[in-house]
Amino acid sequence: MAFSFFSNFSKKAGGEIAYYKLNDWWKNTLTSEERNIIRSTYKPLNSNCKIDEGVIQSSSQSKLSYLSSLTGWFKKKEHYELAVKIINEGEKSIPQSDNILDVHFFFQSAINIFYSRRNDDNNALDISIEYCKKQIDISKKVKKAFLKEYPNSPLPTHIGYKQLAIIYEKQKKFDEALKITKKALAEGWNIEDCNNRIEKLNKKI
């Protein structure tokens, strides 16, 4: 009986964990409780298996894109620490990513998680600001990739620009909020939203 328990514990994970080479993270970074939370919470429509069971032969998602999507399942306050662990693992995958859109959407996931917990974690607001800036830093490359991938569609809302402008406005840094919004407008991100914000900020200044 004891041998059976040990065998199950030491057995390598399968499924998406194995496919994306996340075994070390799964076993050594996450607690047993966190692994169970992921198993019970993460239930994508296209899968009947648990995240660490079965064999996956191929996937259209990159590792970074996968971790970005996984983060979205753990937005609740009680899952914050788990979401941070997923984000931290995603950070390690950025240097290996050859898709700038995957990096863009990963930063967006991180912004959403940390900003939503700004009142619970003293560091969360500063971290969300840093992720906004990271997303803005690659915005021109992302714009080029968007236009190539979706040539007949307008650019979507850029969360990094939008969220940073909101943060600056709440901090009464109206000039900085205006500057960042005009930059978003110049690049073509969600022009209508930018115009409305510029008008409001000009009134406040």
Image (cartoon, rainbow, N blue to C red):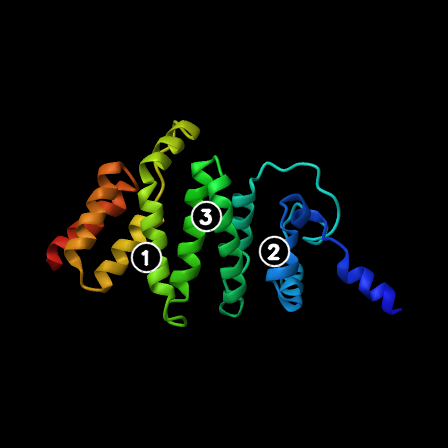
Quick one: label 2, few (<14), some, or many (20+) residues within 10 Å? few
The circle drawn on residue 7 is: none
Label 3, secondary structure: give it.
Answer: helix
Distance in Å between CA atoms under marks 3 and 2 = 18 Å
Label 1, secondary structure: give it.
Answer: helix
Q: Which residue is mark 3?
A: 106
Distance in Å between CA atoms under marks 2 and 1 = 26 Å
Q: Nearer the viewer, mark 3 or mark 2?
A: 2
Q: Position of residue 150 (x, y in %)?
A: 42, 30
**Residue 152 position (above or below residue 66):** above
Q: Is residue 114 visible?
A: yes
**Which residue is rendered at x = 39% and y = 55% of the image?**
111
Q: Which residue is mark 1?
A: 129
Q: Nearer the viewer, mark 2 or mark 1?
A: 2
User: Mark 3 or mark 2: which comes first in sequence?
Assistant: 2
Q: Which residue is mark 2?
A: 25
On screen, residue 85 versus residue 9, left or right, reads left
**Which residue is rendered at x = 53% and y = 53% of the image?**
89
**Residue nearer the viewer, 166 or 173:** 173
User: Mark 3 or mark 1: which comes first in sequence?
Assistant: 3
Kindly identify the amino acid type of the residue bearing the numbered disc 1: Ile
Q: Position of residue 173 (x, y in %)?
A: 18, 60
